[in-house]
Amino acid sequence: MVKEIERAGLPVVHICTIVPISLTVGANRIVPAVAIPYPLGNPTLSKEDEKKLRRGIVEKALKALQTEVTGQTVFEK
Amino acid sequence: MIKIVHYINQFFAGIGGEEKADFKPEVREGIVGPGLALKTAFGNEAEIVATIICGDSYFNENLEAAAKEILEMVKKYSPDLFIAGPAFNAGRYGVACGTICKEVQDKLGIPAVTGMYIENPGADIFKKDVYILSTANAATGMRQAVPAMAKLALKLANKEAIGTPYEEGYIQRGIRKNIFREERGSKRAVNMLVAKLKNESFETEYPMPDFDRVTPNKAILDIKKTKIALVTSGGIVPKHNPDRVESSSASKYGKYDISGVMDLTEETYETAHGGYDPVYANLDADRVLPVDVLRDMEKEGLIGELHRYFYATVGNGTSVANSKKYAAEIAQELIKDGVQAVILTST
């Protein structure tokens, strides 16, 4: 899906837990996530801390969208 | 007799489904689950001495640690052969099988075989490194997969010559081998051309590799003026799944209006995805689709606007062809609606 959206001309960032899958599929901007059932969360944290964690990942995703890349790039944790 | 260690996931071990996908590696003496069918296929030639079980999520979330732990377990039995799966179209299971087979081969020098459906992401990642028997996309193909895997595995253990992917049924590894043919190349090429002109079937001797890569689009210059859309393969839908997006092999995607929605709550949204434990996403779907955070950022002026609709499908066993089709349609709509960038989340 990421690839087709990119192909259509929209810059897209893929937030995902299993980075090797995203790489093999062909995403260009990749932001690693937390865990499979909660990529942008962590139920062991308090609501506030969890939202902070989520915001951190989204901020990284926005930064990835603002970064020129020439090929597949993983924006590390 | 050839000694085998077999790797399977929590599901095939009968431990549980997605709620047990965080199950840590455990070794059991002898046969568990699909090992029984393998045993029948091996007859008296080989014996499964141990079965290693690991939850799919645990493995994929801890790739290096899990592989290391399992490698130690394998080592203890010093087997002649290692078999993983088959994983069919289960993505995390496929990645686990591929990873551990490669580790066992590279680090312990023990031949390894696994089985997967051609669209399993694990197949694409590991086909060059590991013999992956091509299987059906669901466990209903177990009966065909097992004898073929056993046959290939025994050949490897006995150091017999391995035939072509076509003969042995494994997924092409990208290896080229020189062979002698009866007819010379020019004649074969002309025959092929004639067949093509007559609309007859012919088989190319050199299939072109499929490098389907898309060039990255230009970066966003002014994020504060950018309209951003959310798309997910994690199956987030309004409560009770009004479009009935299927929990696996989704035949559709949903488009949902979130104007005025500041936060996805337990009462309003849920996941339709059947390929991960839904408990956490059902309690708070922002954990998969970060609407709450993007609303905050929209208010704070850090992004231009969050697009009025989000799009969701279930990326569980959904075919590549369908995923492509859905995303192409979604992208056209997004462009029409003036969206300039997309955040796509996957579980």
Image: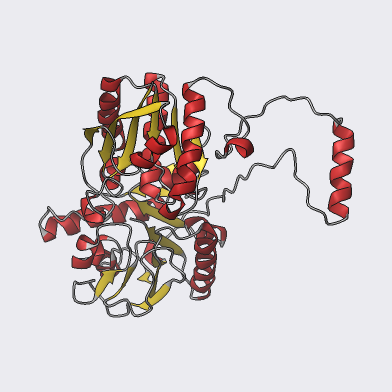
- At 57% across and 34% down in the image, what residue appears? B173
- At 70% across and 42% down in the image, what residue appears? B207
Q: Is residue B308 visible from the viewing direction of this image?
A: no
- At 28% across and 80% down in the image, what residue appears? B260
Tag count: 0
Residue B300 position within the rendered picture, expressed as x and y whole percent measured from the top left = 26, 67
Q: In the visual, does A54 lie left or right of B156?
A: left
Comparing B130 with B27, the one in front is B27
Q: In the visual, does A42 lie left or right of B165?
A: left
Comparing B51 with B294, the one in front is B51
Residue A70 position within the rendered picture, expressed as x and y whole percent measured from the top left = 52, 44
Q: In the visual, does B268 lie left or right of B197?
A: left
- At 41% across and 52% down in the image, what residue appears? B139
Residue that lies at the very extreme toward the front in this rendered image: B44
For the C terminus of chain A, which image quadrant? top left
Residue B170 position within the rendered picture, expressed as x and y whole percent measured from the top left = 55, 38
What colouring does the structure picture have? secondary structure
Comparing A4 with B282, the one in front is B282
Q: From the viewer's perspective, is residue B122 above or below residue B301?
A: above
Which quarter of the figure has residue B63? Answer: top left
Q: From the viewer's perspective, is residue B310 above or below residue B133?
A: below
Which quarter of the figure has residue B171? Answer: top right
Residue A50 position within the rendered picture, expressed as x and y whole percent measured from the top left = 16, 56
Q: Is residue B223 visible from the viewing direction of this image?
A: yes
